[in-house]
Image (cartoon, helix red, strand yellow):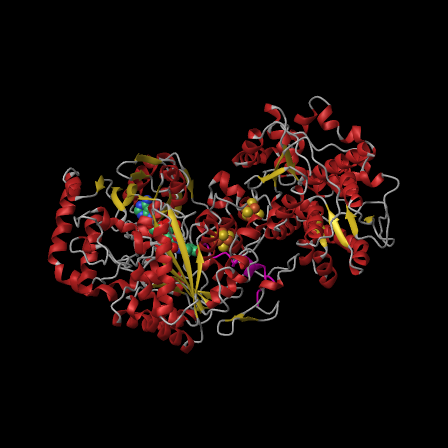
Amino acid sequence: MNAAQPIVLHARGDTELARRLRKAVAGSVLFDAASRGRYSTDASIYQIEPLGVLVPSNDDDVAAAMDVCRELRVPVLARGAGSSQCGQTVGAALVIDHSKHIRRVLDFDRDAMTVTVEPGLVLDALNAYLRPHGLWFPVDVSTSAQATLGGMAGNNSCGSRSIAYGNMVHNVCAIDARLADGTTARFGTAAEMAGAPPRVRELVGRLAAIGARERDAIEANVPKVMRRVGGYNVDVFHPQSERPYTRDGTLNYAHLLVGSEGTLAWTRSLTLQLARLPAHRALGVVNFPSLYRAMECAQSIVKLAPSAVELVDRTMIGLARGNPAFRPIVDGALIGEPEAILLTEFIGDSADAPARKLDGLVALMADLGLPGSVVRMTDAGAQKALWDVRKAGLNIMMSMRGDGKPVSFIEDCAVPLEHLAEYVDRLTQVFAKHGTRGTWYAHASVGTLHVRPILDMRRGGAAKMRAIAEEASAMVREYKGAYSGEHGDGLVRSEWVAWQFGPRLARAFDEVKDLFDPDRLMNPGKIVRPTKMDDASLFRYPPGYRTLPLATALDWSAWNVDNDPVTDTLTAPGTGGDPAGGFAKAVEMCNNNGHCRKFDAGTMCPSYRVTRDEEHLTRGRANTLRLALAGRFGDDFASEPVRAALDLCVSCKGCRRDCPTGVDMAKMKIEFLYHWQRAHGLPLKDRAIASMPRWAPWAARLPWLANLRDTMPGAAQLSEAIAGLSAKRTLPRFRRDAFLRDGALPQDSAADAVLFVDTFTNYFEPDNARAALDVLQAAGYRVHVARPSAQDAEPSRPLCCGRTFLAGGLVDDAKREARRMLAALGPHVDRGATVVGLEPSCLLTLRDEFLSMGFGEAAQRLSQQALLVEEFLARESRAGRLRLPLARLPQKRALVHGHCHQKAFDAIAPTLAVLKLVPDLAVDAIESSCCGMAGSFGYEAAHYDVSMRMAELALLPAVRAAAADTLIVADGTSCRHQIADGTRANGRRQAMHAVQVLARAVRAARSNEGATR
Ligand SMILES: Cc1cc2nc3c(=O)[nH]c(=O)nc-3n(C[C@H](O)[C@H](O)[C@H](O)COP(=O)(O)OP(=O)(O)OC[C@H]3O[C@@H](n4cnc5c(N)ncnc54)[C@H](O)[C@@H]3O)c2cc1C
Ligand code: SF4
Ligand code: SF4
């Protein structure tokens, strides 16, 4: 049978499969179109719909599922984070995603420095576990926060420091595997194999026979570079790698499974060799006048025994400098305007050793004719920051708009260092010949440079891909390199396995496959019996790819562009030919790299952090939207699968900031909800919440009535039954003394600051607005409290940013509110005043959604002059203009939780900065994601549990751990509510707006002054 042909399903098809699986397993069996769609892509250019998806609860589930699949002759495809770049994890199979549940550390031997883990454990999680012991697993892939160890072994992954530590194959001691026929065995040394079941002993004997028979072919055809990850590692029998797979040169059968991409066996657990964490590191950044010189010098630099030599070229430097977060870091590493830099790291147990090597690097560069070209970095923080920029390399590159994208297919060829400069030069010329260009970066130390020519797979990309691949492969052969040097074979390179290893070894690979998996059920079509790399039927965006036309509510034209790969220019907004006005192209910015599957710093993505479900991940949502726009759920974009995928999105805008390609799911959710509510209507409860700014003035007049829900016994339960508002929550309380009802609010047409008081602050916490006014005036600013313009149709109703309307998808209503705002604030903005606000989600709407509503220049100007009150004060302070009298408070510490939108707009640093102006106040930020309340989200009964779990990730434990006299600061109304609710059981903590802390310090200063008078 040819594995390129689809496996013939049992007559009863996948429905039978689903039914059987549901009976056999405890985990989630996902066979709906949306789930299958979400698992039909990885970080490659391909898309194949799986037959179904299983998220197993444990290893028994995997065993049961494989039994069912064997009986029904259905292929199985193991999947971790799905961050493969070559299409390894897509296929017409049952996809088994072990990343959610199968991720324990099973055994840790500190003395032997080994650890045994389940395949779904993520590398960063393992290294966090090992850090206290001074150890780490040193295969430091760029995707360390996502990559599972099972997936890393599957791909024989390699990190930036492979020159010092090797690839996966050099660091795996044993693999506990399950074969397609259900046999389980530990694959390891020959001695370990002696105790294996008879089926495995026989298998091993026949493998050894193939090894013996093919000795000549192995020696002749397996590239002798360390970075060779293509094909099967038959060189376990006759080592060819520059770096031996085992320290003592003995044979280890686990190494045959490493890099086999799930085609030979299922990895149940892996035993890994650990390394000591280097005590000291030093980084030398060598600046080069040309890429060629950088590549030429790499071979001399590696002789200094660095732990890494990583290239970053001019284009990448430029892209990184375009990112405000990265710019200062990159600038600190540059001397003038280099064409390329090499990040050269040295490690050692004492500070001396790396420092000496760094001296050696400086001397070497002088000898090579480049004196003064090295920036020395010995500070650990500065080094880490620069490494983070390097790690973000690919993602930075992928943020390119338009249909032309950098495509992975020759992105990891490995060539011996002496040929590197020539290889780069020649390949650059090949790109130019085909009307494209590439950006060069990554592992110069081992001759594996990442480069992705920009191709449009919808328009002629496939032909160019093949033409470039042919020329690149010819060069790789000429230089005796490896065509697949890091990311594996998958769908894009398996076709080249026979080319690389020759027909004899290719036949041997077939035999190996058949010995392990005679029915060819394990991830068919990869490594052996492959499809063609340019088979357009497997592309995510094949020629002729179409999306549904859509009249969008928001302006997406900035994405509706084409790019020119050579000149790196974009066409004008709106000219990209997207029938969805740019929305589809914005959605397509998600390249499936999986960066949103993260648990470390940053906000993205709270719903994934608590569910670990692909559906509730930014990537899963972007894929669901993409599939809907491609008509995969019918002609109606406003379809149920999209609603379900967006249901737990708390619109935190974490992805807007943290997603490397800028996928802004919060904005996409608004767009979707607009279409949804037009097609399906909005439930009364949602409409009531959305239009709160309209009825709030009445509620504030009769607060006892408006607050009845929380004062009358049984009313909360009733509200849950009728309106879906959780009875476990109290609701914000309307205050009779709303701020904007105060009689003598300053109205000043020459004010420096125009105070915009949002609906929440005005009606629920008016004291915050009073505090802001007090602080601004105490600092000597002239303040004007924003009121509707004289021409406003509802002059007595306070201004509103429209946030609640946007959250319900009522974009037309939100636009109406925005128009009122622009009319009232525009004249102040035009004369240069700053609009100052308190509630991050409201004020920052002026800097975000207002720009997508078609208000042009007026909205632009407002967005540039709208600041949170702390941003305003911090700006004034930086400019040396702030004269704010602040005195010591009784409390000595403030713990700050940033609102998600504050974080998304880098507005948390100013809050910390101004709080630090209070004498003797220690200010720390809580490293937290979303508080989980997110507007009305956490109040809804259906979301209550998820909401609390989000809060429990980091925020609530940090608040509970804080000393009783620590000030808890949170600028978001809902964050404060969540903190109060979440600490109810253990002595409720009341968080306060930062401006309240400042106001207290101002009052303290006044009373000090009064006392001294
Ligand atoms: C932005 C970006 C940067 C990257 N940087 C690097 C890098 O620095 N170095 C590098 O080497 N790679 C890199 N990669 C590629 C990829 O991240 C790595 O190969 C990673 O190790 C894959 O891990 P995963 O959990 O996503 O595996 P997946 O993609 O889910 O799976 C990888 C392979 O392993 C198989 N597999 C998974 N689990 C099992 C199991 N239990 N049993 C048997 N087979 C299994 C799968 O079938 C598949 O063939 C990068 C990718 C991206 C998108
Ligand atoms: S949403 Fe962003 S971070 Fe997540 S996979 Fe897509 S591009 Fe990557
Ligand atoms: S807005 Fe927040 S919850 Fe929604 S996808 Fe982005 S990071 Fe996740």
Please indicate whether residue 150 sits to the left or right of residue 539 in the image: left
Q: Quadrant of the C terminus?
A: top right
Residue drawn at 29 percent across, 62 percent down: 303
Task: Report x, y in % for residue 73.
Answer: 29, 47
Which residue is most to the top? 713
Q: How many marks?
A: 0
* Position in image of residue 534 (x %, y %): 37, 66
Q: Nearer the viewer, residue 910 or 698?
A: 910
In the rendered image, residue 92, in percent from the top left (x then y), is placed at: 36, 52
Membership of 582 in magenta stretch: yes
Residue 67 in the image: x percent, y percent?
A: 29, 40
- Front one among 23 and 356: 356
Which region shows up in magenta? 577-594
What residue is drawn where x is 78% and y is 51%? 753
Residue 739 seen in the figure: yes
In the image, 151 versus 419, the foreground residue is 419
Q: Is 876 above or below relative to 103? A: below
Q: Is residue 681 visible?
A: no
The kind of secondary structure the magenta stretch mainly shows is loop
- Res 987 → quadrant: top right
